[in-house]
Amino acid sequence: MTQLRFLILIPFLVFACTAGAFAQGNYASKHTVMSDGHPMVVWEKSVDNPKGIILLHHGRTWSSLPDFDLQVEGEELSLMDGFNDRGYSVWAMDARGYGETPRDESGWNTPNKAAKDLSVVLEWLYERTGEKVHVWGWSMGSMLSQLAAQQYPERFASLTLFGYPIREGAQIMDDNNVVEPPREATTAEAAASDFIVPGSISQKAIDEYVRHSLQADPVRADWNQQHEYNQFDATKVSMPVLLLQGEFDPLADTATHAKVFSEFPNANKQWVVLKGGDHAALLEKPRGQLIDASINFIEWLDK
C-alpha cells in the first residue's frame, strides 16, 4: 500500500507520496517544429550541462512568452529564467493560434490535436537532447499536458499540473451552435484578471504583462471538440506527477485535487499548496515557492 506523508514546509505545504544560466533580460531563442505539416513555435532558454529538460505549456488565452518569460526592469518574473538559475534548460511551446504559432486551415484547435502537437515537440526534444522531458502545464496547459501524458507517455520524465482547473464529475460539452471560429479580440481586463491577491504583484508588472499579452495574442484562439477533455483518467497517467495549487486559486478545486492525487498510480507524486498563491502565482510573490516546489520535486525523483 502506498504511504501518504503529510509535510508542512514553510512557506508551502507538501503532500508527498513516497516510494522508495541565463541572466534576466536575455531573450529566448525561437525554433519551429513541424507537427503533421503545421509549424509549431518552440522557445528555448538553455544552460550549459543542464540537470534536466523542462517543457512549459501555457494556458487558455495567452501564449508562452508573456506567461513564462515576462521581462520587467528591476523585477524577476520569468519562470524560464528561474528554472535556468536552478540549472535546468527550459523550452516553452506556443499552441496553434497562440503567439507565433499560426492557426491551421480549420481555424480551430482541439484537445486531441494539441496533445498530439505536444507529443511531437517532446519527440523533437528527445531527438535533440537524448533525454526525457519534465512537462509543466499551467491552467488549460495542465489539462493538455495530462491528455498528452495519457496518450503519448513515452517521452515524459514527469508531469507537473499547476492551476489545474478540472472539477470532479464535470462533463465538458461542445457549443454546437458555433460553426465558424469567432476570432474575438482579447482585452486588457482579461489579461489582468488572474491577479487577485492584493499586493502579490506590482502594478508595473501587471501593466507590462497586459501590454505583452495583448501584443502577442491580440485575438483569442478558438477551440472546439472540447468533449475530448472527458477522456481524462488519472489512473492512466503513468509517470510521476506534481500537483501545484495556489492557496487562493478560484479555479483549482481542492476536492478534485484530492481525488486525482489519490488516483495517480505512480507512487512518486506530490501535491503542493502555494501559500498566498492564486491562479497566476508563477508571476507573483509565491513565484519562489513555485520554483522551489517544481525543482525539489524533480530532484526528489532523482534521489
Image (cartoon, rainbow, N blue to C red):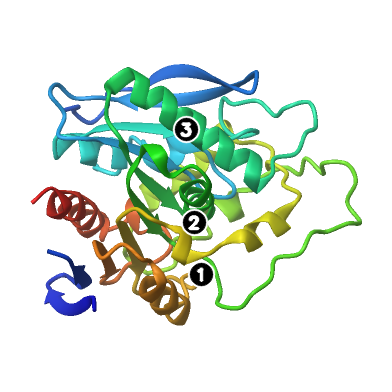
Using the image, determine if residue 13 lies above or below residue 192.
below
The circle drawn on residue 139 is 2
Q: Is residue 291 left or right of residue 258?
A: left
**Could you tell me which residue is drawn at 21 percent across and 59 percent down?**
289
Q: Would you call the spot at circle 3 few (<14 residues within 10 Å), some (14-19), or many (20 or more)?
A: many
Q: Secondary structure at mark 1?
A: loop
Q: Is residue 28 visible?
A: no
Q: Is residue 109 left or right of residue 297?
A: right
Residue sitting nearer the eye, 169 or 68: 169
- Where, quadrant-wise, is the N terminus in this rendering? bottom left
Q: Which residue is mark 3?
A: 93
Q: Secondary structure at mark 3?
A: strand
Using the image, determine if residue 212 lies above or below residue 148.
above
**Could you tell me which residue is drawn at 60 percent across and 54 percent down?**
190
Q: Position of residue 7 (x, y in %)?
A: 14, 77
Residue type of the residue flagged with mark 2:
Ser
Q: Is residue 51 visible?
A: yes
Q: Which residue is mark 1?
A: 251
Give the mark, 1 or 3, whose residue is nearer the N terminus: 3
**Could you tell me which residue is drawn at 60 percent across and 55 percent down?**
189
Q: Position of residue 251 (x, y in %)?
A: 51, 69
Q: Position of residue 71 (x, y in %)?
A: 33, 34
Please say if the residues under marks 1 and 2 sit with CB atoms less than 8 Å apart. yes
Q: Is residue 3 left or right of residue 190?
A: left
Q: Quadrant of residue 167?
A: bottom right
